[in-house]
Structure formats: structure tokens, C-alpha cells
Amino acid sequence: MNLMEKRLIEGVQIKPLTAHADERGYLMEMLRCDDPIFQKFGQAYVSLNYPGVIRAWHWHERQTDYWVVVKGMVKAVLYDRRPESPTHGMINEFFLGEQNRILLVIPPRVAHGYKTIGVEPSLLINFPTEPYHRAQPDELRLPYDTPEIPYDWGIRMG
């Protein structure tokens, strides 16, 4: 099943990205204020992640995240923990990075995390709709291996 045929958690969106390459390198637009998926700008940050590292689980009450992986690869996993959602309990798994250039939109209250896959570090850029507030962060957490989310971060062989 390709990405466009995949059933997505309510509110999750995907934007395919195109790298325009020439002999100098490439240019790739990630997010524009005139994109239909754009809401507003809160801040931008980059996260460097070592191979095999899992950063999960967390969610936001108000914030929407816009993830792009510009170096390496990550397995991003989303879990719809919203009881009122038509996709409550659904899990989506995405592979983002150099081998699959997409922007992933994660709505509020959807638990999410990622694992760097492959043998090199990953660089994940986030354009959240809200700035981070150290005194009162809009971030709730569970451990990556919580029994509350039915997901195994291991590699599935076969």
C-alpha cells in the first residue's frame, strides 16, 4: 500500500517533498505559509538523533507538529489517544528522511515518537505551531515501552 492509500489517523496529513537537484546540490522546500496544511508558526528547531535512539511517547494539548527529516532516516509512529476521535486507538507508522521525503503533520493530542533507523544519525526539523514554554510546557509524556500504547519498536523481519 502506498502512502496516499494508507488510512491516516484523523487530522494527520502528509505533504510529499521534492528535492530540486543540480550539480551544486539540491534545494527542497519544506513548509510554506500558503500551503493548505499550514496553520501558524510557533518556532523551528532541529533535533540530532543517534542510530537506534527512540524518542517516545509524547503529545501536546494545543500544538500541531510539522516534522521533516533532512538527514538520515527515522521511523515515526503516531497513536490516536483521543477517545472522541473516529480513529481512536489507531496507529500510523511512517518512514521519513532521505529515502522518503515527506512532511508529516501531527495534530494535538495524538501521541507520537520516532526511532532513528540505519547506521547514521538523523536530523529532524520541527515547525510546531506554538513556541516552547519552559515554565509550562505543552507536552505530556509516557515511556517508549508503555503498555498503554500497543506498539513494539523492534524491527519486523520477514
Image (cartoon, helix red, strand yellow):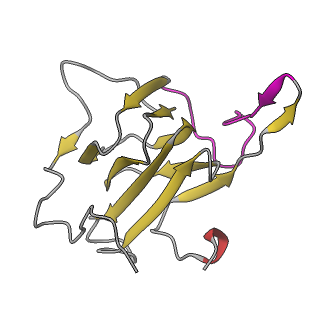
Residue 76 in picture, x, y percent from top left? 41, 54
Disc count in the image? Answer: 0
- Taking depth in this image into account, of 84 and 158 the one nearest to the observer is 158
Q: Is residue 84 magenta?
A: no
Q: Is residue 135 left or right of residue 25?
A: left
- Most extreme residue toward the left, as rendered? 147
- Most extreme residue toward the right, as rendered? 22
Image point 52% across, 40% down: which residue?
Answer: 72
> Does residue 131 sit above or below 126 in this rendering?
above
Q: Which residues are magenta?
A: 24-42
Image quadrant where one finds the C terminus: bottom left
Q: Is residue 105 left or right of residue 1?
A: left
Image point 40% across, 77% down: which residue?
Answer: 86
Residue 53 in picture, x, y percent from top left? 28, 42
In terms of image quadrants, where is residue 27? top right
Residue 68 in picture, x, y percent from top left? 55, 40
Predominant secondary structure, magenta span: loop
Image quadrant where one finds the N terminus: bottom right
- Taking depth in this image into account, of 23 and 38 the one nearest to the observer is 23
> Does residue 88 sit above or below 71 in this rendering?
below
Image point 70% across, 33% down: which residue?
Answer: 33
